[in-house]
Image: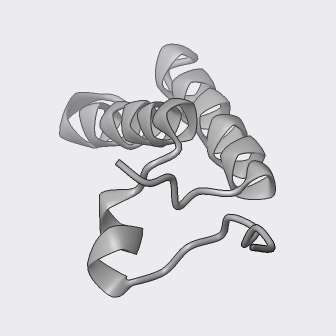
Amino acid sequence: MKENVGSIDRIVRILIAILASMIYFSGLVSGILGYIVLAVGGIMLLTSITGVCPIYKMLGMSTCKRSKR
């Protein structure tokens, strides 16, 4: 798949994933809301590692720099 997540976007997504896991594991949220926060963090981490965001793809967006050809 073609990457559509840029460098700055990846860093922000990793920071969101770290924040979400800190919120969950510190016990600030629990139950269903805790699982939702943890899932959002996992999705952010996964999309930052792969460089592909399905929502960006559906919307036709990309935060990657375009290469000059």
Residue placed most toward the observer, 15 or 47 = 47
User: Residue 52 at x, y = what percent?
Assistant: 43, 49
Seen in the picture, residue 44 relative to 55 is either above or below; the reply is above
Locate residue 54 relative to residue 62 in the image: left or right. Answer: left
Examine the rendering and report whether any part of residue 29 can be seen.
no
* Relative depth, front residue between 63 and 68: 68
Instruction: List x then y, in percent, for residue 4.
Output: 52, 61
Q: Which residue lies furthest to the left in this view?
A: 32
Q: Is residue 69 above or below residue 12?
A: below
**Residue 62 at x, y percent in the picture:** 56, 73
Residue in the image at 80% along x and 55% along y: 8
What residue do we see at 80% from left, 73% from top? 68
User: Which residue occupies the foreground of this view, 37 or 61?
Assistant: 61
Residue 35 percent coordinates (x, y): 26, 32
Is 51 displayed left or right of 8 in the figure? Answer: left
Q: Is residue 12 visible in this depiction of the protein?
A: yes
Q: Quadrant of residue 53?
A: bottom left
Q: In which quarter of the image is residue 69?
A: bottom right
Of all residues, the one furthest to the top in this rendering is 25
Q: Does residue 66 sit above or below 36 in this rendering?
A: below
Figure quadrant of residue 23: top right
When the figure is inspected, residue 9 is found, relative to residue 20, above or below; the finding is: below
Rendered residue at 68%/46% (across/down): 10
- Which residue occupies the foreground of this view, 43 or 39? 43
